[in-house]
Image: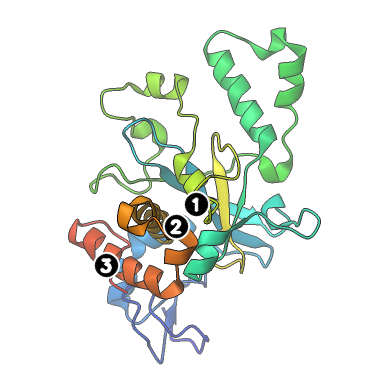
Amino acid sequence: MPPTTSHIQYCDKCHLPTKTPKVCNECGTASYCSIVCQKAHQEVHQPTCRPLSPKEVWGITVLPGHPGHPPQFQHELLTINHRIFLKDGNKQNMCLGSLLCGVPLLWYRSEQVQLKRTLERHGALGIHPETNPTAAAANSMSTPEESEPTRHVYSLSSSNVKPHMTASENPPTGESTQQASESPPKYNQAAALLCVDLNTGVTLDHFDGPVVFARQDKKLLTRELIEAIWKFHCSIKEDSEKAEYNWATMSDLMSREAFQSFQSEYYLEQTAKGRPGFDPL
C-alpha cells in the first residue's frame, strides 16, 4: 500500500491524524496510518471494499428485529439516482434527529419492494402469485434501483456473531431458519425511531419492513455509525419520557456535542465487548 497525498488525514482504524495516509489499493477509499491498522480493519472494511463510480454511494438498510431481538443493519450499494436522493417537490425524507447529531440522514421505503416481499411470503405459505393476477403484476413492478442487491447483514444480538453473516445463517434463538423466513417481523421500530417527530415523540409514518438510509452528503454510512445514532435516539427518547424531563422534548435534548459524547462512550463499551469496528474515537 503506497503512500498517497490524498486529502484524507485520519486513519479509518485508529482515527488518528496522519501526514502520509495510505489508501487501500482495492477500493481507493479507505485510508490508514500503517499496515498494522489496515490488517486490523480488514474484517470491517471488507464488505464495502470495492471501487465506486462517481454515481455510487454506500447506504444502510435497516431490517426489523424479531421480538426480543435487535434490528439488523445491511450495507446497501445505491446510485445517486436512487429515489432516496430525489426530492419530492422541494422536500427530502430527512431524519431530523440525525441532523441535530451532525450526520444528516435521508430515508426511503419502497412500497413496491415491500409488496413483492409480501407476495413472496404468501407463496411460501401456499398462496401462489400465478393464481392471483394482481400478485403476478406486482411481482414485476420493481424498478432497477429497487431490486435487492447483495447485502451484508450486521446483527447486534451477540458480540460473537460475524458481521457478514446472512439472516438465514443466523436465525433467532429457538427458531428454525424456515420459521424465521415464514414469519418475518413487520414493524421496523429502529427505523421508525430514527425518523421520529422530535417535538411529539411520535413517528411520522408506519414503518413496515426494510427501510433504506443514506447520508445526505453521500459519504460512506457505516453500520457502526448508524447503530450509534439509533442508540442515541433510544437514550434521548427515554430521557424525554422521564418525570424530571417532562418539560423537554427530544429536540431540546439533542445536539451535536451530546451525540459526540454519547458516541465516544458507546464505542468504548462495544470495544470492551470485543466487537470489531467500534474503535475509540
Left or right of residue 241: residue 102? right
Name the residue beneath numbered marker 1.
Answer: 194
- Residue at 29 percent across and 59 percent down: it is 276
Tell which tag, 2 or 1, sits nearer the viewer.
1
Residue 147's image quarter? top right
Nearer the N terminus, badge 3 or badge 2?
Answer: 2
Q: Which secondary structure lies at badge 2?
A: helix
Residue kind at label 2, given as amino acid type? Ile
Residue kind at label 1, given as amino acid type? Leu
Percent position of residue 267, x then y: 29, 64
Percent position of residue 5, x then y: 50, 90
Is disc 2 in contact with disc 1, using a CB cutoff of under 8 Å? yes
Q: CA distance from mark 2 to mark 1?
A: 9 Å
Nearer the N terminus, badge 2 or badge 1?
Answer: 1
Name the residue beneath numbered marker 3.
Answer: 265
Nearest the eye: 2 or 66: 66
Find residue 226 and name its label: 2
Residue kind at label 3, given as amino acid type? Glu
- Residue furthest right as drawn: 89
Nearest the eye: 168 or 1: 168
Crowding around mark 2 (Cα neighbors within 10 Å: few <14, some 14 to 19, many 20+) is many
Coloured how? rainbow
Q: Is residue 229 above or below residue 70?
A: below
**Does residue 22 appear in this view?**
yes
Percent position of residue 254, x then y: 44, 66
Q: CA distance from mark 1 to mark 3?
A: 20 Å
